[in-house]
Image (spheres, helix red, strand yellow):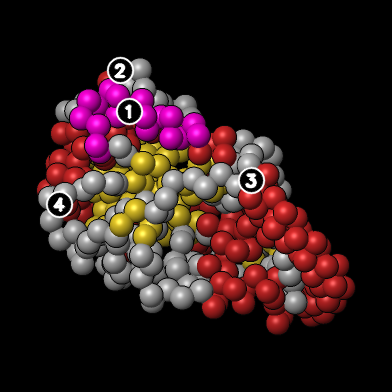
Amino acid sequence: MQRMAAADAASYWMSERIPNDQFLLYCFAAPSISLDECARRLLARARRVDDLCLRVHDVPATADRPYWVSAEPTSDQVRVDTTSRTWSSSLEAVGGLVADQLVPSRAAWRLHLFGPVTDLPTGEGESVTGVVVVLQISHALGDGRRASQIARDLFTAPYDNERRLGAFGVPGPVREVGTVVLGALRFPSEFVRTIRRGMQVARVGGQANPGTPGYPLTRLNRNPGPRRLLRVIVVDRERLTAAGSPVTVVVLTAISQALPRYLGEDCIRLGVELTVGRSERSEARNNFRNVGIDLHVEVDDSAERARLIRGEIDAARAADADPARVAQRRVSEVTPAILTRWGIRAFDLDTRPETVTGVTVVSSVDRGAADFDLDGGEILFTTGFPALSPVQGLTHGVHGIGDRVAVSVTTSPEIMPDVDRYVELLRAALA
């Protein structure tokens, strides 16, 4: 058993209020074996990946943070759909998965295989037929970088000589009692440390970097409802970065051009909420923060706009070392579990704020080299779909593997019934 880090526990509890499962999609050329056999081998591989052999144990009465406990992957965690589909209809099927969120205390991940799928884009003006594999994973199990590494471990693990997991850990009744007792023993010291560190935050509060002010709400910042619309643009990495800017900067610059045209409003200020991974090591599986990045729509020259956006990102990364921010993180690391969960449950999701960190969310993850396949089917591209929230009806994913980058758009019919118009504007801006 391993006690959850504070950030991971918060992500787990927040999933009860706002669904936040991650959906990591990988497209492969047609494998050399049947899809059912691919599924069998992937299940065997999953048993060799430590992170996929875990589930959540909830401590009764929230006396402590949840624990990670061992759990052998089971066949019902790998689902196969051999219906012939097009790429667009497979995206519809993936969008439907959002409604079936994981219960991490039963299973922290699920794998979906679709094939054959025709018209898979390659970013080179042609399409192929292949297989779509989607790893649905609890956000508590890892942020974008960690989940991407888990997926890579899954696809590259050996599938022969399956690991025999055998019996697991402490018997249930003993675990129930033991975790409650440990939590009760921790509470007094955590409560005292929370107060002390809170006082430290008050002392250094005046040094805090104020960061980017919030942005006015747009028609995108409404409750999106339960349905999802997914779109993906696949582009060549070298062409995307030909002007010398990093992938994330190029995509943000393209969004800064497409979004005002789509909204058709006098957008004086527009910003995005960007997920930024932390560089320092942490025991938390979720080691990132969300920052507001101004898109500088007031600047007409695209090269200058890209330069300013890059400066915003660099400044946001540097601000993470601000003494006040560090002190705030240290408070959350020791706050008693019952207080943290109470705060999450008490958070008002029905009242719209006056401003938002960004009018849309962007998550950008480089998933490394294209050096693995699916039983003979080469990896074509990968993408993902950041979750929507009551005030975020549009999110973007930026995911690269090898020499291909996929830019995803996630929204809903309530927010963007004409999503394809926005996608074409974004495609033109990327070009």
Q: Residue at x 39, y 25 (%)?
A: 246
Return the x and y of residue 378 as percentages of the image width and height.
38, 31
**Residue 368 vertical placement versus 335 (above, below):** above
Q: What stretch is highlighted in magenta?
A: 297-315
Return the x and y of residue 230 as percentages of the image width and height.
26, 53
Mark 3 Cα within 10 Å, few/some/many (few <14, many 20+)?
Answer: few
Contact check, label 2 and label 1, Cβ < 8 Å? yes
Q: Return the residue nearer the eye: 279 or 85.
A: 279
Mark 1, secondary structure of its residue:
helix
Q: What residue type is labelled 3?
A: Gln
Q: How far apart are marks 2 and 3 (CA)?
A: 37 Å
Q: Mark 2 points at which residue?
A: 243
Q: Nearer the viewer, mark 2 or mark 3?
A: 3
Quadrant housing the C terminus = top left
Q: Return the residue nearer the eye: 299 or 206.
A: 206
* Drawn side of residue 120 relative to residue 214, left or right: left
Contact check, label 3 and label 4, Cβ < 8 Å? no
Contact check, label 2 and label 3, Cβ < 8 Å? no
Q: Residue at x 29, y 46 (%)?
A: 270
Q: Distance between the residues labelled 3 and 4?
A: 37 Å
Q: Nearer the viewer, mark 3 or mark 4?
A: 3
Q: Return the residue nearer the eye: 28 or 147.
A: 147
Q: Distance between the residues labelled 2 and 4?
A: 29 Å
Q: Is residue 68 magenta?
A: no
Return the x and y of residue 296 as percentages of the image width and height.
30, 37
Q: Which of marks 2 and 1 is nearer the N terminus?
A: 2
Q: Which amino acid does label 4 sit on?
A: Glu
Q: Name the residue under label 3.
A: 207
* Disc number for residue 306: 1
